[in-house]
Image: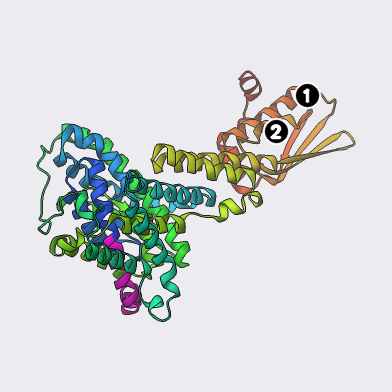
Amino acid sequence: MSDRLRQEWLSNIRGDALSGLVVALALIPEAIAFSIIAGVDPKVGLYASFCIAAVISVVGGRPGMISAATGAMALVMVTLVKEHGLEYLLAATLLTGVLQIFAGYLRLGSLMRFVSRSVVTGFVNALAILIFMAQLPELTNVTWHVYAMTLAGLGIIYLFPYVPVVGRVLPSPLVCILLCTAFAMMIGLDIRTVGDMGDLPDTLPIFLFPDVPWNLETLMIILPYAVALATVGLLESLMTAQIVDDLTDTGSDKNRECKGQGIANIASGLLGGMAGCAMIGQSVINVKSGGRTRLSTLIAGVCLIILVVFLDDFIRQIPMAALVAVMIMVSIGTFSWESVTKIRNYPLSSNIVLWTTVGVVVVTHNLAIGVFVGVLLAAMFFANKVGHYMGIESTLQGDTQHYRVTGQVFFASADKFTASFNFKQVIDRVVIDVSAAHFWDVTAVASLDKVVLKLRREGIDVEVLGLNQASATIVDRFGVHDKPGAVDDVLTH
């Protein structure tokens, strides 16, 4: 237990402390912006980011991943806040947490294995594009000073690591923020800062139970939003966990992450915060700045609340251009450039799934819809591909026709299976050898029934050989070709 505790908390103290500070600075404008999107006071998003990051560091399943208030969740809340107000949002946040905990106990995190690599890459690319697009309002209708500082910030981020010794010790995004802020304050640049985005909270969050009537009517109001929030939150969190797994070459407990997200959202709702989930942008910042363990996530949350409550005079002076530079770095680092440079090396079906996922997410700004479309397309292409691998060879031996079936028989290959038999052939006996095949579903069983009964209707003796145990079980359960009176019943449908 002590070894695990040391590994998850104390194995990378310096890297986690510095990366946590960088993430905290990057979280501030994001949390404020997402609060504005949701139609609530900026402190709701800031309290949520602090609370969720701190709680998830302890109960989450992916060390080093950052969870806080997010844009995807904020978009789901807009209508609820507009029509019913903040208290109902807090109630929906509590219910969201409960649903996510149930999802964890139902082991829904294991469903990530059904998400193909093409969908994950499309998800990553779409988020990179959305992160970049979110910075454009800060770069339009502004003075040249903003562009100059943004370019300078990017220069610091990409060149500082080449500075001997110190370049490997300090995260370049943190250096970018500190230098740009110091320069802007020193010469008095009149550019947009964090303080221009909204008022920062001046007190720590307090326990706040939602002031709503706890009855069936309230449940019916918040349930649709809670289901949507839970779905989007888990989807984004599990996808982000998978990405951080790949970046760090480590594994994580997806079902524990589901429960952890639920506990964190319940805590957020009780402290006056909105629902949140994992953030790919900040998670990438954390990893690329050296964060690896749970300590980095905890420090990010604690530093966030300390900065906005006790050091708000300094935080207000941070130029948005510096944070835009950091987020542009994140979008560049997040995007899978290999998916573009090696597009010709990938199968057409993979490219279609990948770029369709990107397109749907970018157009709708809804990660759940994009991933759903991607998974659906991937499943269709997979079914079509596997269906083509099913084949039937036929040989005539005396008065017996032998059919040898090879491959997978299911809904996508059932028609091909049926069409491979000659029902007009004048023969006494047919043997169907399925020892190299597998029957997966009721459509496959219905096709076998149809073939056997059509042949028997022509007066042909039919024998099916070689059903494996799993196929035999489903055929025995749903098949009718060996049951009395089945010929007329099946052939008339």
Vertical arrangement, residue 197 with respect to residue 252, above or below: above
Q: Which residues are magenta?
A: 1-25
Question: Which corner quadrant of the image does residue 61 belong to?
Answer: bottom left
304 sits left or right of 390 in the view: left
Colour setup of the view? rainbow
Q: Residue furthest right?
A: 398
Q: Amino acid at mark 1?
A: Gly
Mark with earlier residue (1, 2): 2
Viewer-nearest residue: 373 or 479 = 373
Q: Amino acid at mark 2?
A: Lys
Q: What residue did someone put label 2 on?
A: 416
Q: Helix or strand or loop: what does disc 1 sit on? A: loop
Q: Residue furthest bottom?
A: 165
Q: Estimate how packed mark 2 is, as few (under 14), some (14 to 19) or many (20 or more) residues with alpha carbons within 10 Å.
A: some
* Residue 459 numbered tag: 1
* Residue 300 numbered tag: none
Residue 306: % across, % down? 17, 65
Q: Residue at x 79, y 34 (%)?
A: 430
Viewer-nearest residue: 266 or 474 = 266
Residue 7 among those drawn in magenta: yes
450 sits left or right of 338 in the view: right
Quadrant occupied by the N terminus: bottom left
| Mark 1 vs mark 2, CA separation in Å | 23 Å
Residue 295 among those drawn in magenta: no
Q: Residue furthest top?
A: 492
Residue 203: % across, % down? 9, 58
Residue 468: % across, % down? 64, 47
Q: Residue at x 38, y 50 (%)?
A: 236
Viewer-nearest residue: 404 or 127 = 127
